[in-house]
Amino acid sequence: MDIRGPRLRKPSDEALAFTSSMASDGRIARHVIGVNMAHMAALMRAGEVDRAVGAKCMKFLSGTSPEISPGASAEDYHQQLEQDAVDAIGVEAAGYLNYGKSRNDQVATAIRMELRSQVLGLIGAAVALQKALLRQSGRSGTLLVPGYTHLQRAQPVTLAHHYLAYFDALQRDAERGLQLYARVNISPMGSAAMAGTSVRLDRRFVAHLLGFSGIVRNAMDAVSSRDVAVESLSFATMTMLDASRLAEELILWSSAEFGFLELADAYAASSSIMPQKKNAVAAELVRAKAGSVLGDLVAACAILKALPYSYNLDLQEVTPQLWRAMDDATRSLNLLAGMVGSAKFDQSRLRRSITDDNSTAVGLANYLVSNHGLSFRQAHSVVGHLVRTSVESGKPLHEVASRQLAAVTGRLGKKVSIDAATIKALLDPVTFLEGISTEGGSNPRFIPRELKVRERELERTGSALSGLSSALKASERKLHATSGLAREVKPRIEH
């Protein structure tokens, strides 16, 4: 029996190839099998399907491979699986597989099942990158590096301060992922096409068997919404924005113009014509993938923006965008973790980069305010004048200030004299940073405390991630052990 039924004639090969999702259904095939098993268990439990018939279906499902044969001709894997069952065990038994369910609620459920794993995988990649940042901060964190605003030298900071900024951004990404997971992990099954079903089904029992924490309450919402796909794409996009900024800095910092670090050869490539080249190709592709992931988000939003409720086949086109973006983001963060963890910093180059670059000038201005009664704007003007003279004369700021400070402040009616040793100390990068007192600042003495705070955050995220991953594995084992015991399995989800 052809399960498509007699209502329509066979579609043209061209139309079938155009509308079929078989090429991308491999990602959800095993989940489709699982959904069918849980649904059949619920039918057996409710007495809607004879136990012998149900057992026959369960045996077929448990022995079915989720591999999709190349060139398989079907609208989707849902249809192919049911057709294979009819061909294998007969329509008298397999004909009950779709009793009380639709491809609409089935595909929405299978997507969420795969998406759960994808979200956890991306959170795990963010954690891996955080660990690499933390290790480098512990190993080389006291190194001083130029801090930039507008890509111009601003103030010196420690490497730990710089890298922990990325750590914290990724921490927020990971927290968004965990919040997202709770919204992904609810089951559409039992919604059927859009209105629910008259078949006696305990939706919460099905949800429990599939490892969900609850159900999408409204049946129409359950089958026609893809907000979790958009939110997952947004999650991937936000992590990639952070990843791309870090990748850009690795590219810049490894260039001859900066020379702050050298990336490991494993993440670089040579030129086909210039034998001296070492190109940061992995970081470049991370930067590019951020644009691809953003494009996937925009594409999904464009597909969804004008769809009437309920299900439309347009929704099928969102799914490939989702898987591609989650793959790109996860791989990018894992690669960045390797790049960050293996990078080697040039200490002498870093030291030279912050020597006499005037980036500690605000330290002198603050000293004039706190010790000599100038307002900050007056002190800003005085030091700005001294910096200009330093730049134009090519002499270090501390020398210019030692000779001209009294004259410049005298024009304000507040003649100030500071000895040369004090001025030089005020403008020294280490002294400058050690004078920072505000929480979250770049004082080298803060590093051990800041690292411990981040270690605790990583432990909390790792614990949450481990718990969710273990729960998914346990639910999958339980589902595949359910086939002959469907009547005895009790739901554990609160009503």
Image (spheres, rainbow, N blue to C red):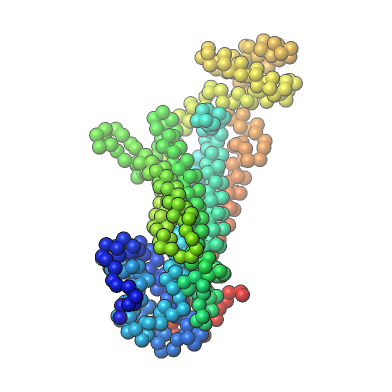
Q: Quadrant of residue 104?
A: bottom left
Q: For the C terminus, which image quadrant?
A: bottom right
Q: In the picture provided, is 301 more to the left or to the right than 495?
A: left
Q: x, y percentage for residue 81?
A: 35, 74
Residue located 55% across and 46% down the image:
169
Q: Kindly tell me whether residue 367 is visible in this rendering.
A: no
Q: In the picture provided, is 35 more to the left or to the right than 18?
A: right
17 is higher (above) or lower (below) than 410: below
Farthest-out residue, left: 273
The image shows a total of numbered marks equal to 0
Q: In the picture provided, is 300 more to the left or to the right than 169?
A: left
Q: Kindly tell me whether residue 446 is visible in this rendering.
A: yes
Q: For the N terminus, which image quadrant?
A: bottom left
113 is higher (above) or lower (below) than 339: below
Residue located 39% across and 43% down the image:
288
156 vs 324, nearest the viewer:
324
Q: x, y percentage for residue 153?
A: 52, 28
Q: x, y percentage for residue 157?
A: 56, 34
Q: x, y percentage for residue 402?
A: 63, 14
Residue located 46% across and 62% down the image:
115
Residue located 51% across and 72% down the image:
195
